[in-house]
Image (cartoon, rainbow, N blue to C red):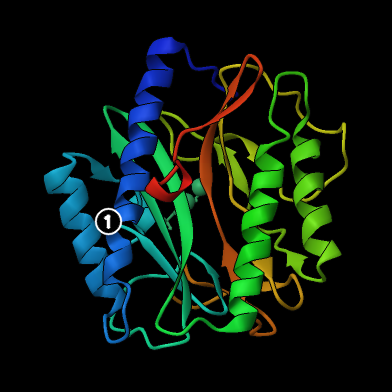
Amino acid sequence: MTVTIKNEEQREKMRVAGRLASEVLDMIGDYVKPGVTTGELDSICHEYITNVQAAIPAPLNYRGFPKSICTSINHVVCHGIPGERKLKSGDALNIDVTVIKDGFHGDTSRMFFVGKPNIQASRLSEIAFESMWLGIRELAPGKHLGDVGAAVQRHVEKNRFSVVREYCGHGIGQVFHEEPQVLHYGQPGTGMELREGMTLTVEPMVNAGKPNVKLLPDGWTVVTKDHSLSAQWEHTVLVTADGFEVLTLGADDR
Ligand code: MF3
Ligand code: CO
Ligand code: CO
């Protein structure tokens, strides 16, 4: 597999898929309240994606993943499986939505806070958010993937948090996870050179403690080894002639 360059027709389909994915997150925010289970959030998103958007939730059955979205609470880094867990005030969770529309994927995630936000969790989320944007702002033809990783890593470590190494951003298009890998750490000027028409995700996972993670026996849920909090934000982005276009902006980002 190699990197795919999207033509104008494919870029337009990526815009549509990206918009739909962000609209799912815009929709689900109101349901993130104490007492709701992550399984209920999954059902609401599943119904919305399939019935309202006439799209496909990409995670469902992807390599055996059993649900339509990922819900990663507190020390869960990513790929949390929705289930019976009830949200309670003070929880921070990432909801990660990927939809397929007309054969193309849109992938985006945001942090949500339940009830009264925990100060440490909001600070961590803010740094993760800023680091994602600093990474995105590096995207332009002639720049390198290492520029993205370095920008993310610099901001995270300056704030004494850590970047998860085992999971990364990715090329995206007709395939959910395609080349290249978008590492959230690295050296400026190294790695693949970016070209107009590439579509990528930038999705740093940022830990309050050490960067190490471990996989739970369910085969999906990734947690911090030291049980410290973790935060993540994700956008799908197109590399344009003069920089980048974020395809998954939400209502609050516009
Ligand atoms: N949406 C995740 C990503 O950002 C991938 C989830 S794969 C799943 O790449 F199977 F866990 F859904
Ligand atoms: Co992704
Ligand atoms: Co995602």
Residue 57 on image: x %, y %: 28, 48
Q: In which quadrant will I find the N terminus?
A: top right
Drawn side of residue 17 relative to residue 128, left or right: left
The reply to whether residue 67 is visible in this rendering is no
Drawn side of residue 220 relative to residue 205, left or right: left
The type of residue carrying mark 1 is Met
Taking depth in this image into account, of 160 and 179 the one nearest to the observer is 160
Looking at the image, is 93 positioned above or below residue 178?
below
Looking at the image, is 48 positioned above or below residue 53?
below
Taking depth in this image into account, of 173 and 31 the one nearest to the observer is 31
User: Circle 1 is placed at which residue position?
Assistant: 27
Quarter occupied by residue 69: bottom left
Taking depth in this image into account, of 134 and 183 the one nearest to the observer is 134
Quarter occupied by residue 188: top right
Q: Residues within 10 Å of mark 1 (few under 14, many from 20)?
A: few
Count of marks placed on residues: 1
Drawn side of residue 101 relative to residue 6, left or right: left
Residue 245 on image: x %, y %: 54, 28
Drawn side of residue 95 relative to residue 4, left or right: left
Residue 253 on image: x %, y %: 47, 46
Residue at point 41%, 88% (across, down): 89
Residue at point 88%, 42% (across, down): 187
Residue 121 on image: x %, y %: 60, 77
The reply to whether residue 188 is visible in this rendering is yes
Disc 1 secondary structure class: helix
Residue at point 53%, 50% (across, down): 234
Furthest residue in direction top, as rendered: 8
Residue at point 49%, 17% (across, down): 6
Quarter occupied by residue 200: top right
Q: In which quadrant will I find the C terminus?
A: top left
